[in-house]
Image (tube, rainbow, N blue to C red):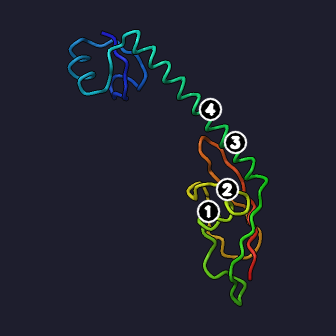
Amino acid sequence: MKVLLIKDVKSLGKKGEVKEVKPGYGQNFLIKKGFARLATPEILEQHAQDELIVAQNLEKEVNALKEIAKQLDKAEIIITKKVGQNGHLFGAVTKDEIAHALKEQHNIEIDKKHINEKSAIKTVGEHDLDFKLGHGLHATLHVDVQGE
């Protein structure tokens, strides 16, 4: 009996693989528990179409992220914060402030979770921030922190 795995099965295989199994195991465990479907030509064709759609969506997402990465590499934002007598900022520049300034100044909307800030920005001056956009894409944003 041939089955198409819908989920990863530890001792059998990964999602999307077609495996030959004994009828009792396939019918009573894999299909009944929702780990697999019977590998008919219609189901295999539907699975191939679904995978094609997923691949197209992934390609669109990667292209959109590449475009955002290009915009971030060219962009520079200016953030104004209050400064104490010693030249240090009151508090630090947060990821939320950076994301808000990016939206306000360049109309680029990005989730603050993508900002890979190693240490908090607590001084006036120019800083470069790394953004992890997903799918192995990175971008660098130039941030100019000015005191008021």
- The nearer-to-camera label among 1 and 4 is 4
Identity of the amino acid at label 3? Lys
Q: Position of residue 57 (x, y in %)?
A: 57, 32
Q: Which residue is tagged 1?
A: 118
Dots 2, 1 in contact, CB < 8 A: yes
Q: Secondary structure at mark 3?
A: helix
Identity of the amino acid at label 2? Asp
- Quadrant containing the C terminus in the rendered view: bottom right
Badge 2: residue crowd in 10 Å (few <14, some 14–19, many ≥20): some
Dots 4, 2 in contact, CB < 8 A: no
- The nearer-to-camera label among 2 and 1 is 2
Mark earlier in primary sequence (4, 2): 4
At horizontal 32% and vertical 22% (from top left) the residue drawn is 36
Mark earlier in primary sequence (2, 3): 3
Identity of the amino acid at label 1? Lys
In the rendered structure, the answer to whether residue 94 lies left or right of residue 76 reads left
Q: Which residue is tagged 4?
A: 59
- The nearer-to-camera label among 4 and 2 is 4
C-alpha span from label 2 to label 1:
9 Å
Q: Which residue is tagged 3?
A: 66
The image quarter in which residue 131 lies: bottom right
C-alpha span from label 1 to label 4:
30 Å
Q: Which residue is tagged 2?
A: 130
Dots 2, 3 in contact, CB < 8 A: no
Mark earlier in primary sequence (3, 4): 4
- The nearer-to-camera label among 2 and 3 is 3
Badge 3: residue crowd in 10 Å (few <14, some 14–19, many ≥20): some
Q: Secondary structure at mark 2?
A: strand
